[in-house]
Image (cartoon, helix red, strand yellow):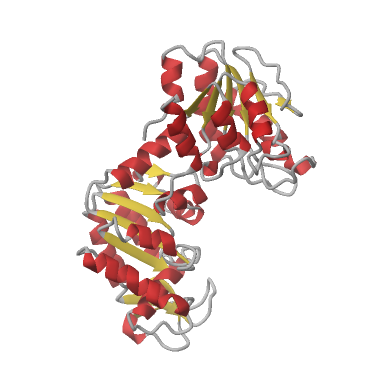
Amino acid sequence: MNVLRFSDLCDEGRARGRRVFIRADLNVPQDDAGNITEDTRIRASVPCIQMALEAGAAVMVTSHLGRPTEGEFRPQDSLAPVARRLSELLGRPVPLKQDWVDGVDVQPGEIVLLENCRLNKGEKKNSPELARKMAALCDIFVHDAFGTAHRAEASTYGIAQYAPVACAGPLLAAEIDAITKALANPKRPLVAIVAGSKVSTKLTILQALASKVDQLIVGGGIANTFMLAEGLPIGKSLAEADLLDQARSVIAAMKARGAEVPIPTDVVVAKTFAADAPATVKAARDVAADDLILDIGPETSARLAAQLKVAGTIVWNGPVGVFEFDAFAKGTEAIARAIAASDAFSIAGGGDTLAAIAKYGIEGDVGYISTGGGAFLEVLEGKTLPAFEILEKRAKG
């Protein structure tokens, strides 16, 4: 993917003395008192900001936070807690600017944080008038928010149309490189793990991957639907009986290419959905009418782990069981450990997947951990993200 990279502009000295507008993803969780409870996204934004400051630019940074109503400021929508945390991480004051669309005073070597961009009228609908005003604030626009790359909004797309220069920040560039390595030029075998509660939410992803991957591992409620499609009993487990034909079509598409969707041969069941429910391992064909399937069994886990260990590329989205309950976490742990032990290039994304990676402490053993949930899923689906599209367009001149 051919886009301008901010790192190259800085190396060439093209950012010195310039007004640089960085669209970051600083949308972090907070408690009721407004304290930040998890700051990964803020920390991930720091390299781009430091790059701009070290290059001698006048730096403006903005982000959305939550789902505010455009044009209506409420204290809980403010980026003030983010400004304080950013100031601690950078070791310098980070002033927060309100009502910034019509002009910002910032000098080379300085940084300002621009208040929640979703407070601006026209942001979500990508208003050309708002986008032009934003573009007029800067000489260089830097998109460094992969988590918003699937949205065409004024601060993610419109500004990139009208800014004198539009480029990808280091975080966005790393996502582009990882996605290209995993999906555009993968080392084979390419194995995808797609898990979650519903086939319907990931059906188009499964269909898109069926034409690309060598093995398509399904888990969670999705696996239950595929088991049902293969004529196996699933008791009272979560499944979508109206999507059996679609599940069969994915299996058929894989078979036609000499690939497979490995169906669980054993599962872990319980009578109730609870952390303290007794867990029982059963052959897949022996699931009783009152059983809930909450994890894959040890035989299935071992078979999938063996396949992952010899993979060339692994794409992971979703845990294969109810890993939040320790009795039903062994399948997800086996998958996680196999990915960590594999020599394959691995890319993982999605909130539950990141939680599983953190639970088993394998962050350092995954090739690339994607920060964007919705954007990551749309890439798997084969969609061209708006942010990538406009940056490629601008790179061509």
Place of residue 345 in the rendered image (x, y in percent of width and height, measured from the top left): 29, 45
Is residue 308 among what the camera can see?
yes
Compared to 114, does 327 lie above or below?
A: below
Q: Is 66 displayed left or right of 244 in the figure? A: right
Q: How many marks?
A: 0
Q: Quarter of the image holding residue 107? A: top right
Compared to 299, does 360 lie above or below?
A: above
Q: Is 317 displayed left or right of 89 in the figure? A: left
Residue sitting at 59 percent across and 30 percent down?
Answer: 159
**Residue 245 versus residue 275: which sits nearer the camera?**
245
**Residue 324 versus residue 396: which sits nearer the camera?**
396
Residue sitting at 55 percent across and 25 percent down?
Answer: 141
Position of the N terminus, as image quadrant, is: top left
**Residue 115 versus residue 207: which sits nearer the camera?**
207
Residue sitting at 50 percent across and 46 percent down?
Answer: 372
Place of residue 3 in the rendered image (x, y in percent of width and height, measured from the top left): 41, 30
Q: Is 120 displayed left or right of 334 in the figure? A: right
Place of residue 105 in the rendered image (x, y in percent of width and height, measured from the top left): 71, 16
